[in-house]
Image (cartoon, helix red, strand yellow):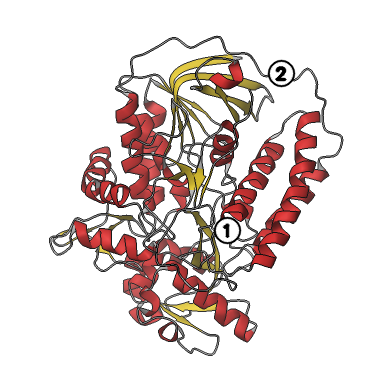
Amino acid sequence: MQNHFDVLIIGSGLAGQSAALRLADSRRVAVISKRSVEISASAWAQGGIAAVLDSHDSIEAHIRDTFEAGGHLNDPAATRFVVENGRRAIDWLVEQGVPFTRSADGYHLTREGGHSARRVIHVADATGLSVQQTLTKKLLAHPNITVLEDHIAIDFITGKKLGLVDDRCYGAYALDNVSGEIVTVGAQSTIIASGGAGKVYLYTTNPDTSTGDGIAMAWRSGCRVANMEFIQFHPTCLYHPQAKSFLISEAVRGEGGILRLPDGTRFMPQHDPRAELAPRDVVARAIDYEMKKYGLDCVFLDIAHKGEAFILEHFPNIHARCLELGIDIAHDPMPVVPAAHYTCGGIVTDLHARTDIPGLYAAGEAACTGLHGANRLASNSLLECLVFSEAAVADILTLPKQALPPLPDWDESRVTDADEEVVISHNWDELRRFMWDYVGIVRTTKRLRRAQHRIRLLMREIDEFYANFRVTNDLIELRNLVLTADLIVRCALKRKESRGLHYSLDYPETLIKPRSTTLRRPAQRA
């Protein structure tokens, strides 16, 4: 089956939804969503959106904080572009009806780790969810937007694959997980808004959909990727057998939360003068150090001293979820551990969100815009989604509408149904476990080489499986995850220093001149 649109958007998080809504008044748009349209990493974002909204704050201060958190690897032009467009992005969300939390003198702004001022606008402690719910209603109601739920993109359709002179992107193939049919979705422009790759690790704050799909697809099509070694581990994921991937917001520490050992000892001041307000990479390494030093399963985050009224006002959702699990955070500390949280690298883009392939854009966590450098500053992620999705839209709207070339249907004539799906589940488990053990918060060259060896073996096995059997959702995700893991390790092995989120025991010093680790796929015949 074939469907043709003006614009195809892969992903239904904030970057994808905001782009679709900005385009829909003049373009026919398709949005591919792996599950229901509400499920995304954006919807799980608790803290808020960083933007300069207060007279006591400044653009320069926000830029400076972003560079400091990012190990000064940040791209100056991209960082300024995002920060300077922050207020307009927030104004657009307000126009859409997002009910940001207010205080007596306007919107309430909180402070998070790495920020020198209160600049995080939020909706209590469920900002992402509120934003997504607001936009989703508009998305589903718009007559020019077609939402393909329960679909997973497989690969892009490019001019090179079609035997054309150009190498433009003309859409993508996608698997309908309900019918099992592979559909051809043609489009003059395609936006990758598929999120990151947190599921490549055993423990993550990400939803199950975060399998690096857009990054892997773009790499296979010939796009550059960069800085994949910088995987942000959020310091405080709730440690509880029934609390899968539940994040404890950065704002808890921003509002006075204290990290303690099981005996109540506070430890962050020994690791950094900013204590609990240090950037995420510093806090995550400190927790990792204390857990290994004392053989702990977790540490504890204590906000009880702020009082129950304060906690219910600022963190009602965290309080309610913890209470369901038997933890009253108004009286008891929360058990927490670091978990893979955010992919700071990704597909290389310019300030118009354009990739190396004409007609193919990337925005949000799948992209490497240069904003985050070696470590994302808290609450800059949703801001980046908004600013760069708008940039992509602005560029797309300058393009004249053109007819698509004939697009071939997906060819399944030489494959059969898989006889043993257990191969996929075993490889998935093995990949996530050795990535956690060998490519985690603290790394060594030996561990990275060991991971690379295992990845290469898995890649060969998965490629053989992919070539001989019909694709399934799990096979597509596993194929993308193992490729993304390979890109992470390759970037990590290229970096001969410790910077931001990449900490190597073999190269503990930071080099004077920061450099990105950019990978380029060798040219291949069509």
Image quadrant in which you'd find residue 123: bottom left
Check whether the beta carbons of the residues at disc 1 and disc 2 lie within 8 A of each other: no
Residue beneath the point at 63% across and 77% down: 297
| Quadrant of the snapshot with the C terminus | top right
The local crowd at label 2, few if under 14, some if 14 to 19, many if 20 or more residues have their Cα within 10 Å, is few
Q: Which residue is mark 1?
A: 492
Circle 1 residues within 10 Å: few <14, some 14–19, many ≥20: many
Is residue 320 shown left or right of residue 81?
Answer: right
Q: Position of residue 209 (x, y in %)?
A: 58, 44
Quarter of the image where the N terminus is located = top right
Residue closer to the observer: 204 or 308: 204
Above or below 228: residue 233 = below
Res 40 visible: no
Residue found farthest to the right: 419
Mark nearest the camera among 1 and 2 is 1
Q: Nearer the viewer, residue 411 or 134?
A: 411
Secondary structure of residue under mark 1: helix
Q: Using the image, determine if residue 107 lies above or below residue 444.
A: above
The CA span between labels 1 and 2 is 37 Å
Which residue in the structure is indicated by mark 2?
Answer: 411
Quick check: 55 left or right of 195? Answer: left
Q: Position of residue 325 (x, y in %)?
A: 56, 68
Q: Amino acid at mark 2?
A: Asp
Is there any visible trace of residue 489 in the rendered image? yes
Label count reads 2
Query: Who is closer to the viewer here, 340 or 218?
Result: 218
Q: Residue type at mark 1: give it.
A: Ala
Q: Position of residue 255 (x, y in %)?
A: 33, 72
Residue drawn at (68%, 56%) of the image = 432
- Measured as percent of width and height from the top left, residue 519 is found at 54, 45
* Picture residue at 32% right of the left edge, 60% below the top: 66
